[in-house]
Image (tube, grey):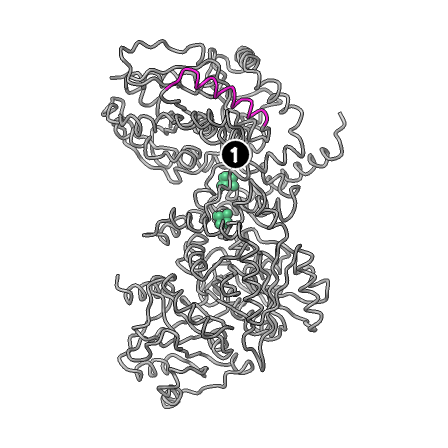
Amino acid sequence: MSLPEGKKMNKQRSKAYQVRIDKALATPRLQQALHQFGDAYLIAREKAFAGLDFEALRQEIGAMKDDVRLNHEKYLQQFIANAQAAGATVYQAATAEDANRYIADLAKQQGVKLSVKSKSMASEETHLNKALEAAGITPLETDLGEWILQLSGQRPSHMVMPAIHMFKEEVAELFSRETGRTEVADIPHLVEVARQQLRQGYLDADMGISGANIAIAETGGIALVTNEGNARLTTTLPKTHVALVGIDKLVPTLEDAAKVIRVLPKNATGQALTSYVTWIRGAIPGGDGEKDLHIVLLDNGRSRLAEDEKCCDTSRCIRCGACANVCPVYQSVGGHVFGHIYIGAVGIILTAFFHGLDNAAELVKACIGCRSCVAVCPANIDLEGIILSLRETIADKEGLGVGKSLVFRKVMRNRKLFHSLLRAASKLQKPVTRGQRSIRHLPHFFSSLTEWRTLPAIADRPLRDIWPGQNLQAPQKKVALFGGCANDFLYPELGSDLVEVMNHLNVVVDYPQKQNCCGVPALYSGDKETAVELAKQNIDALLEGNPDAVLTTCPTCTMALQRDFVEHFKDDSPWRAKAEKLASITVDAAGYIVNQLGAADQFADLPLAQKVTYHDSCHLKRGAGVWREPRQLIETSGHQLVEMDHADRCCGFGGSYSLTSHPDIARKILEDKLQDIEKSGADCVAMDCPGCMMQMRGGLEKQESRVRVTHTIELLAAGLRAK
Amino acid sequence: MESMTQFRVAAEAAGAVLVECQHLVEAVTFIAERAAGDLLLPGSVSCHRVRLAEQLRGAGLNMLPVTRDQAAEAAAGVTSACFAIADTGTLVLESTAEDVRLATTLPTRHFVLLDRRKIVADGLAAVEPLRRMHQQNPRNYIAYITGPSRTADIERVLTIGVHGPKELYILLLDDWSEDLLEM
Ligand code: SF4
Ligand code: SF4
C-alpha cells in the first residue's frame, strides 16, 4: 500500500524519534543523574515552601496572569510607554527572524565585534547566536551551563539547568581544548576556569544581551532572577544592553513581580531565593554617559497561544522548569528527546506554538499523561489536559492510522460487536494462555510485548456475565458500578469483590449492561468523535437506573466520567446537564467508602494482616485527589502500611502507551517502580487501578517476585471472606 | 521569629557571613583583616557621613578609583545596603550609579554595612520601599543580593563564586542610617 506523501514523512519522523529514544534509554548515567536530581529537588522544594500555602500561591499567580492575558494590549502599552519614558528603545518583534534581524542590525550599526550573553531561553528559541554569527558578530555565552553548551555545540536539555545532561569529565575536556592546558575534572576548578576565561569577555564586549524573567507594566522595567552574577556583569559593563523578552513575561505591578519572585526559585530548584534579583528600568548611567538599552518584545506565537481556546492557560507559565523536573518521561530520556527547544510538559505546548505542530507531534505522543507536572506547576496550568487537546489537533491533521481508526470507529462504538469480539478473543487466546490468568510469552510476532512483563489473559466470562445476585433487606444505598474494560474483561473478580465489600456496608450494586468503554483509549489517541459517542452511550446507561452514586474501580475511567464527558458537552446543553449529573455522582470506590459513607471502621481489624505498600495511581491522586482514603482502609483493616519511595510516581502503564506506542519508555518507568516496591519490604502492593495492576503484576511476575499485587477492594474482600 | 534572627538564619543559609559590630571601628578592623588587597569604595551618602574612606585608609587600606579599568584589579568592594529582607536573607542595594555596580560585581569579596533597624519582613513588604526607589530615581538598577555568587551548572553540585563575589560579609551596625532608601 502506498502512503500519501505526508503520511510517509510522519512515519519517517516517528522512526527517527524512536532512534533518539533508544539512544537515550541506553545512557543509564543520564537517567541516574536525572533521577538523583528529581529526588533532591522534591526535598529541597518542600523545604523551600514550608509554611507557605502552595495551592493559594498558585491560584493567585494563575489569576494574575489571566488578567494580563485578557488585558494584554493595555499592559503592553503601559509597559512600552514607561520603558520609553525611562529612555529605553522598545522594539516589538513579531517573529524570531524579526527579533534576530533587529538585534543583528543594531550590533552592526554600532560596530559590535563581541557580544556577551547571559542566559536567555528566548534567544535559544530564536537561534539568535546563529543570526549574530552570520552578521559577523561573536556571541559569547557567559552562563556557565550555556557556555559549556556553546563550546560543545549543543542545545539546552533543561530550561533552568541547561547542561544538566553533561558530566564533569566532558566539561573538563571542553575547557582543556579552550585553554590549551589540561584541566582536571574537578568541579570547583572547572568553575574557576570559567570565571577566568569569561572575565575579559565582559570588559571587551560592546553589547550585552540578556533575557528577562519579568517585565513590569507599572514601571516599564524588567527583572532578572539569576545565581551566577553573569547577568549583572552583562548588563553593567558593555555600553549597549539588549533585553530579549517574551511578551508573556508581563505582569501589572511590582507586587505581582514580587509574587512571581517568591515562587520562581523555590519551584525551580528549591532555593528560597536566587543570589541575585536585578531590577533594571530604563537607560542608566554607564561609562561617560548613559547606557543604550533596547528591549525587544518577542511575540513569535505567544499571541496565538494566548488566543487559543484550549491552550491559552499556558500563557501563565513563569518558566520554572518544574514540569520537567518531576516528569517520569523526562527522567527516562532527558530533555533533548523530551523537548525541542523548550522541554518537558510546557515545552511540548510551546513547541507547538513557537516552532510548529510538526516539531511537537512526537513529543505530544511521548507524554504518558501522569499529571505529575500539573501537581507541581506554580501557575496552575492543566498541562496534561492541554497536551491531550494537542494530541487531538494533531490526530485531526495527520489522521489516526488505518488500524486504530477501524477499531475505534467501527468496533468500539458498536458495543455488541466490541464485546462479542472480546469474548471470541478469550477463546482464541487459549493456546497461548494454557488456561492461566497471565500470558507469559507471546508467539513470534508479538513476543516483544511480553518480554518484560506478563499480560493478563482475557477472562473466560466477563464481569457482566457473572454479575452476582444480591439479597439485601433494606439497602441503605443503591449504586451502579462503572466497570471499564479492564474490570469487565480482564479482572471480573474485582467486580465481584466490590459487590461483596459494598454488600457488607448494606449497599446494593447494579451493573448497567449497556455501559461501554469509557472512551479514554480513543480520546488519548486523538479520536474525539468516538470518545463522544461512547460518552453518550455511557451517560444513558449509567443514569438509567437513577443510582445514588456511580462507583469506579479505575481512576482513568473516573476522570473520563468526571472531567472528559463534561468537557465534551460543554456547548451541547441537553447532554451537558446529563454529563454534569453523572459527574456529580461518580466516585471511586475507596473515596465512596471513606468520605461519603464514613464507613472505614466497618473494616476494622480483619484477618490476614500483612505488610502492605501502596502505589498511588496518577489519575487517582492527581486527578481525583484521592490518596489518604485507600491508606486509611488498608490500615484500619489491620495491615501494616509501609510507604515505598516515590509512591505517587507513575508505573509506566498508560494504556496503549506501554502496549504499542512507547513500550520501551514504559518499561524503564516500570523498572524504577519495581525497585521501589521491592525496597519497601512489603508482601503486597495495593493500588486502586486495574491498569496499574496489569503493569506491576506483569513486571513482578516476570521477575518472579514474591510481592503480590492487589486492588484495595480485593484486599478488603479477602479480609471479609476470611472472617 | 524576630526579623533579625530570621534574616541571620536565611543569609547564613545562603552562604553570607554575618559580623556583629558595636561600633564602626570594629567593622573597619574586620574589613582590614579580610580585604586581602585594594578596595573599591563607591560614593554613598551614609559612608560619606561617617568619613568611611578616611577610617579605612587609617586602617592601612588602599582604595582604587572605581573605574572600569581599575575595578577589575581590586580585591574587595565596600558598600552599604539600603535595607534587607528577613525571610530570604537578602540585601537591597540601589545600584544605579555605575561605581556601585562595578564594586559589587567584579571583586572577589564584598563587604556590606547594614543598619540593624533596616530589615523588612519579606519580598512583598519590600515592594513599598522598592516603589519609592523607583519614584526617587526614574531610571534605576536595583540589586537584591542573597549570599555570594553561585552555580550548580556542572552535575548540579553547588559551587560558590562563579562570576560575582565569592565572599559576602554583612557587617551589622547601629546608628548607621534609618532611611530605607539611603545607601
Ligand atoms: S503528564 Fe506526566 S508524562 Fe506527561 S508531561 Fe506531565 S509529567 Fe510528563
Ligand atoms: S508550565 Fe508550570 S511548571 Fe512548567 S515551567 Fe511553566 S510554570 Fe513551571
Place of residue B26 in the rendered image (x, y in percent of width and height, measured from the top left): 30, 82
Q: Where is residue A580 in the image (x, y as percent from the top left)?
A: 44, 28
Amino acid type of the residue that numbered disc 1 sits on in the rendered structure? Ala
**Residue A242 in the image, given as x and y percentages of width and height:** 60, 66
Q: Is residue A542 part of the magenta span, yes or no?
A: yes
Q: Give the range drawn in magenta.
A: A529-547
Q: Tell me the chain of label 1.
A: A
Question: Compared to B160, does A638 lie above or below?
Answer: above
* Residue B181 located within the stretch drawn in magenta: no
Can see residue A22?
yes
* Residue A406, percent from left and from top: 64, 21
- Please tell me which residue is depicted at 37% across the width and 10% down the height of the picture: A468
Q: Is residue A408 left or right of residue A624?
A: right
Q: Is residue A523 left or right of residue A548?
A: right
- Picture quadrant where residue A296 is located: bottom right
Q: How many labels does the image show?
A: 1
The residue singled out by tag 1 in the image is A666
* Along the viewing direction, whichever of A415 and A486 lies nearer the viewer: A415
- The image shows residue A83, relative to residue A14, as above or below, that is below
Q: Which residue is drawn at 44% across and 64% down?
A: A275
Residue A648, quarter of the rendered image: top left
